[in-house]
Amino acid sequence: AQTVTQSQPEMSVQEAETVTLSCTYDTSESDYYLFWYKQPPSRQMILVIRQEAYKQQNATENRFSVNFQKAAKSFSLKISDSQLGDAAMYFCAYRDSTGANSKLTFGKGITLSVRP
Amino acid sequence: DTEVTQTPKHLVMGMTNKKSLKCEQHMGHRAMYWYKQKAKKPPELMFVYSYEKLSINESVPSRFSPECPNSSLLNLHLHALQPEDSALYLCASSQDPYSGNTIYFGEGSWLTVV
């Protein structure tokens, strides 16, 4: 079974600084998808970024980018120019491509606080 | 703004009550999901509907009963719940049930069982 590990339960960053959230996963599959979701206090789970394992290029979305190391099974999220609105719980998630109804496996999440 | 809409946002119910949570998506998606989430924990999958048919039931107790009246709507009927069922219930959808498609979540319904 696939597992996703987020080893740091909490992190803090100064506003306007850069922070990296780490995530590792374990799978025997070669083709799969990785996601970062953000869940602010309002509780809606929002997609931040998506990475396809067969793509070498790291995904980016404005201030958010990933460092995808397939061999190391690592998928970290970098947030540049941190803003107060970035404060939230962040979940790393994995979904394999072995057919229909493959499940989304979440890590335990990390709580990010942003200091003004 | 979310395109997956859940009602009600908050629900308090007694253990003998019958209530329902409702979910609607406006993206033409053909897969819909119910997740349960406890505070500071990741969401746990409960049910998956693919093309309006129940395709996954994660061994959820029968006091939770899902229903998919059409491709846009998903309900979760609640009956004889226990206090430990108090949680945030998240509805989600994706274009279809296949792996690469992103799953989009609603804002959730906070359920308190008293």
Image: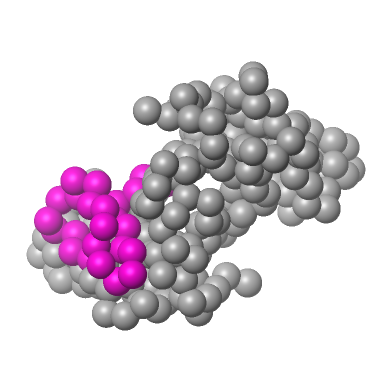
Q: Is residue B32 above or below residue B99?
A: below
Q: Residue at x 33, y 64 (%)?
A: B50
Give the quarter of the figure containing the C terminus of chain A.
Answer: top right
Q: Residue at x 65, y 43 (%)?
A: A51
A63, B55: nearer the viewer: B55
Whether residue B27 is visible here, answered yes or no, is: yes
Q: Is residue A49 above or below residue B111?
A: above
Whether residue B108 is visible here, answered yes or no, is: no
Q: Residue at x 19, y 46 (%)?
A: B59
Q: Position of residue B62 (x, y in %)?
A: 12, 56
Q: How many marks?
A: 0
- Classify residue A52 as left or right of residue B76: right
A53, B70: nearer the viewer: A53
Q: Residue at x 40, y 65 (%)?
A: B31
Q: Position of residue B45 (x, y in %)?
A: 34, 48
Give the quarter of the figure containing the N terminus of chain A.
Answer: top left
What span is in magenta?
B42-66
Q: Position of residue B4 (x, y in %)?
A: 49, 71
Q: Is residue A4 above or below residue B107?
A: above
Principal secondary structure, stretch drawn in magenta: strand
- Classify residue A67 as left or right of residue A15: left
B14, A33: nearer the viewer: A33
* Residue B48 image-quadrant placement: bottom left
